[in-house]
Amino acid sequence: MMTESAFLQYTDRLFAHIEDQIDEAGLDVDCRLAGNVLTLEADGGGQIVINRHTPNQELWIAAKSGGYHFSLRDGAWLAARDGSEFFAVLNRALAETSGAAAAVEPFAG
């Protein structure tokens, strides 16, 4: 488990990485960071909300397809529900929301 400070620094860099990857891919998705929440909004109005839950050191994704809670296990952010990897879920949600294939690369940290 990371210290709270390390978790906040890591997730700040993670959020910036996601924004950079979306910009580089040219997706029609706006990114807004407010506190612990990164909101991705497609031109068509669909949204994905990525939240860092500091007390549990989890990442949460809320999208049309559902909600996921991820914790760091063996170097990967894995969903508690089904073991899905964070970036795989994010890319599926981005494709569903934006209508375009998305390939946000995993973040090494």
Image (cartoon, rainbow, N blue to C red):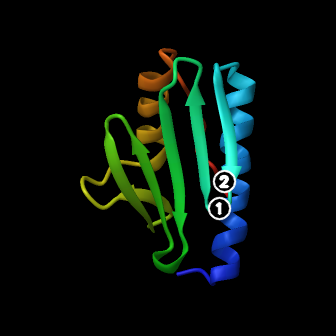
Q: Image point 52% across, 15% down: which residue?
A: 100
- Residue 61 in percent (x, y) is at 44, 49
Q: Image point 65% across, 61% down: which residue?
A: 11
User: Is the C terminus in the top left, top right, bottom left or bottom right quadrant?
Assistant: bottom right
Q: Image point 73% across, 56% down: which residue?
A: 13
Q: Amino acid at mark 2?
A: Leu
- For mark 2, does the 10 Å Cα neighbourhood hold few (<14), some (14 to 19), or many (20 or more) residues? some
Say which element carries label 1. helix
Q: Which residue is mark 1?
A: 11
Q: Is residue 101 above or below residue 18?
A: above
- Residue 35 in percent (x, y) is at 67, 61
The residue closer to the viewer here, 35 or 109, is 35
Q: Which residue is mark 2?
A: 14
Say which element carries label 2. helix
- For mark 1, does the 10 Å Cα neighbourhood hold few (<14), some (14 to 19), or many (20 or more) residues? many
Is 2 displayed left or right of 101 in the figure?
Answer: right
Q: Is residue 56 above or below residue 47?
A: below
CB within 8 Å, label 2 to label 1: yes
Q: Image point 31% across, 43% down: which residue?
A: 66
- Residue 92 in percent (x, y) is at 41, 31
Q: Amino acid at mark 1?
A: Thr
- Residue 28 in percent (x, y) is at 64, 19
Is 7 displayed left or right of 92 in the figure?
Answer: right
